[in-house]
Amino acid sequence: MKVEPVAWREGVVAILDQTQLPERVVIEEFDDWRGVAEAICAMKVRGAPAIGIAAAYGLALAARQIQANTIDAFRAVFGEVCAAFAQTRPTAVNLFGAIERLQRVVAQSHTPDEARERLLSEARAIQREDYEADHAMAERGAALLPPNARVMTICNTGALATGGIGTALGVIRVAYEQGKLQRVYACETRPRLQGLKLTAWELLQEGVPFEVIADGAAGTLMAQGKVDAVLAGADRIAANGDTANKIGTYTLAVLAHYHRIPFYIVAPETTIDPATPDGASIPIEYRDSTEITHLGGLQIAPTGAPALNPAFDVTPASLITAIVTEKGVYRTPYRFGLPVAR
């Protein structure tokens, strides 16, 4: 089936509720921007590129709700809506990139009606650009893999997380189509199990050979010589190449480095944040402790057990073999804007 996490449909924002996958495929339609913002908070839509697209459409939807006769009044209310979206997921830089792009549109518009029309066009452009970037990244990333590659990945970086075929999972899809892929090891990705629920669902849709593994099994498989490369996505890439991604990515990078296995980050250029100098400057989202202590609504921890739940960790640039974007392949020392072809 075609996977489309976010879409604009005749004045509403349609979001595939990923919290209900794989048991149910449920598409919710929002005619109020607040519903879109809440869907981002609740991870009904997730993945940095998809979050950016959802926010862009949410802002285009908000523009239709703003009652203002002058552009100055419109800009004031629109700024408040932008601030609300900025609070939804602080680590994903694509969110802020989308907000900034749409703010520029409003700043350049002369009337509320002009702003509304241009905002929707800009949101559609963000989605289209991400679709094109995914395919370019996938081709570049697949070229880095050896024949009969056995690849490990974490979280979900497929079509569910982007506006196209995915980032790291997009590479996997293209490598499989090219006959270069032998097997995928999908880490379950505690605590929300995006690997077990979402990546496995997408790989089943595509017929790609894979096995889901417990997060703690990654090192054993590497030690047994069963992994040729590790592919991960990114929620924010600092100017020096330090990369924030789903919690557990740093662990994989350390294991891959120890076992001399290439570790690749696959992400669009929009994920690179030149304003963030290094990983220590990346804001890390902490989520509700019940994501740790409960599973599917069932409490699995002793009552009263405290839990710490960082949603992301930072992988130092020194542990990353290469960063693959739609514009090229970057290697250390990372100088973004000057990619190396291979």
Image (spheres, helix red, strand yellow):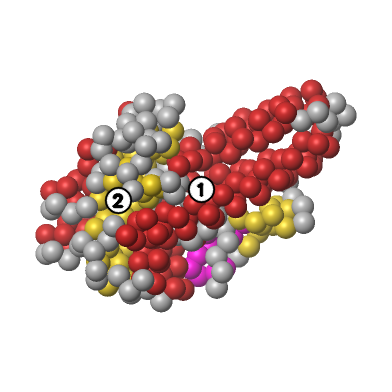
State the image quarter where residue 151 is shown. Answer: bottom left
**Quick one: quadrant of the N terminus?**
bottom right
Marks 2/1: CA distance? Answer: 24 Å
Residue 257 appears anywhere in the view: yes
Viewer-nearest residue: 79 or 225: 225
Residue type at mark 1: give it. Pro
Q: Residue furthest bottom?
A: 207
Q: What stretch is highlighted in magenta?
A: 15-25
Tag in front: 2 or 1: 2
Viewer-nearest residue: 288 or 342: 342
On the image, the x and y values in percent for residue 142 come to 34, 61
Q: Which mark is residue 96?
A: none
Instruction: Please give the residue where the numbered disc 1 appears in the rendered image.
Output: 49
Give neighbour class at mark 2: few <14, some 14-19, many 20+ (Cα, 10 Å): few
Instruction: Please give the residue where the numbered disc 2 appears in the rendered image.
Output: 342
**207 vs 143: above or below:** below
On the image, the x and y values in percent for residue 217 come to 21, 60
State the image quarter where residue 244 is shown. Answer: top left
Task: Give the SS element for disc 1.
Answer: helix
Q: In this view, does 191 lie to the left or right of 22?
A: left
- At 60% from the left and 46% from the top, the residue drawn is 126
Task: Give the SS element for disc 2.
Answer: loop
